[in-house]
Image (spheres, grey):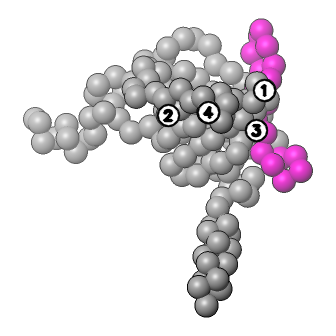
Amino acid sequence: MKKLILIISIIAMASCSNNDPQEQIKNLNGYWQIEKVEIEKDSVIEYQLSQLIDYIEITDSTGFRKKLKPKIDGGFINASNDSEKVTAKVEDNRLFLYYETPFDEWKEEVLEATEDELVVLNRDDKKYYYQRYKPLLSQDEEETQE
């Protein structure tokens, strides 16, 4: 009986994972803060607080990614005037992001893209883990401080 429950639990968890590329595309848009980079299985760089966040906007498979610097009031400052052109493509039931700048072109595979988490594998086999950005000072906290 315990084995049956274990098997059913594993199947249920696997079916809940969001690996549908079309759903992943929908979850990409928004502000993302780097959490960690897995260089190798045993080598991970953790980011406690990053000064830059990534803003991704994709509509009809094309869009851009831009680096922004969050302000204490919840707004943003452009970290640079540069942005990267992004094209999302589904290949072999996997989602790839093709980037293009005047200086380079590359692609990354989206391993996971949920409402709150984003994991991508870059061309150097490094895994980048992001979490949905949450302002340091939320709108509710601002109102209570006034």
Q: Percent position (x, y) of residue 44?
A: 56, 30
Task: Indicate left or right for 89 with 141 as reference.
Answer: right
Residue neighbourhood size for the residue with mark 1, other residues' Cα within 10 Å, grouped as few (<14), some (14–19), many (≥20):
few
Residue 92 among magenta residues: yes
Three-letter code, disc 4:
Asp
| Residue at image mark 4 | 42
In space, the residues marked 3 and 1 are separated at their CA atoms by 9 Å
Q: Which type of secondary structure does the marked residue at label 3 adopt?
A: strand
| Res. 133 mark | none
The answer to whether the residue labelled 1 contacts the one labelled 4, judged by CB atoms less than 8 Å apart, is: no
Is any part of residue 63 visible from this angle? Answer: no
Residue neighbourhood size for the residue with mark 2, other residues' Cα within 10 Å, grouped as few (<14), some (14–19), many (≥20):
some
In space, the residues marked 1 and 4 are separated at their CA atoms by 19 Å
| Residue at image mark 1 | 123
Q: Main secondary structure of the magenta part?
A: strand
Task: Indicate left or right for 39 with 117 as reference.
Answer: right
Three-letter code, disc 3:
Glu
Sequence-first tag of 2 and 3: 2
In space, the residues marked 4 and 2 are separated at their CA atoms by 16 Å
Three-letter code, disc 1:
Arg
Q: Residue at x 65, y 48 (%)?
A: 112
Magenta stretch bounds: 90-106
Three-letter code, disc 2:
Glu
Quarter of the image holding residue 137?
Answer: top left
27 to 103, vertically: above or below: below
| Residue at image mark 3 | 109
